[in-house]
Image: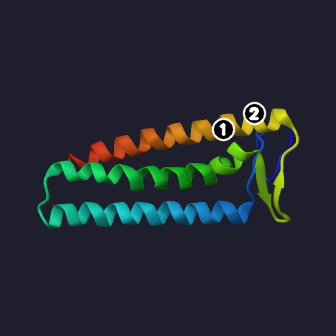
Amino acid sequence: MTNIGNKSNCPTNINSKERTLRIMAGFFMLMLSAVIWGMINRYGLARGWRFVLIGPYYLAGLGFFQAHKATCVRLAAQGLRKLDSGVEKINDTEEITVLRRIATGIKIKSVIAAVVLTLLSFLA
């Protein structure tokens, strides 16, 4: 298994620039969620409209968790990695399997975070 820029023994498939982009996307989606929540409250829309927040919360979670694990879920699904030299195919099947397992965990954590944050929006 290849270790690319991560302190643990887990493989990664994105470089630091890509991690930064995902953090910025996560913050953008979190801020968008706050704006949507504020508009729902400001205009007195029915509480059910708060379920709309699940989408931006999910995308925010994807951004943050991908940055944390240095793993892009789309690239992992395709068996690719994006390093300083560009996008390249991963030839090690064990590494691809591990990356896909990490990507699945990222998606699951993002769903859980989105559901929890959406439900918390109903408390306010």
Disc number for residue 97: 2
The amino acid beneath tag 1 is: Ile
Q: Nearer the viewer, mark 2 or mark 1?
A: 2
Q: Residue at x 28, y 45 (%)?
A: 120
Q: Residue 44: image x %, image y %?
A: 11, 61
Q: How many marks?
A: 2
Q: Residue 98: image x %, image y %?
A: 74, 34
**48 shown above or below 99:** below
Label 2: few (<14), some (14–19) or many (≥20) C-alpha neighbours in 10 Å: some
Q: Residue at x 28, y 48 (%)?
A: 51
Question: Is 27 on the left or on the right of 98, as rendered?
Answer: left
What residue would you read off at disc 1? 102
Disc number for residue 77: none
Residue 95 placement: quadrant = top right
Question: Is 121 on the left or on the right of 12, as rendered?
Answer: left
Q: Secondary structure at mark 1?
A: helix
Question: Is 20 on the left or on the right of 52, as rendered?
Answer: right
- The tag earlier along the polypeptide, 2 or 1, is 2
Residue 6 visible at all? no
**37 shown above or below 69:** below
Please name whichever residue, 25 or 79, is drawn nearer the observer in this view of the structure. Answer: 79
Label 1: few (<14), some (14–19) or many (≥20) C-alpha neighbours in 10 Å: many
Residue 31 visible at all? yes
Residue 86 placement: quadrant = bottom right
Distance (Cα) linking label 2 and label 1: 9 Å
The amino acid beneath tag 2 is: Thr
Q: Secondary structure at mark 2?
A: helix
Q: Residue at x 13, y 66 (%)?
A: 43
Which quarter of the rendered picture does the N terminus lie within? top right
Q: Residue 32: image x %, image y %?
A: 38, 65
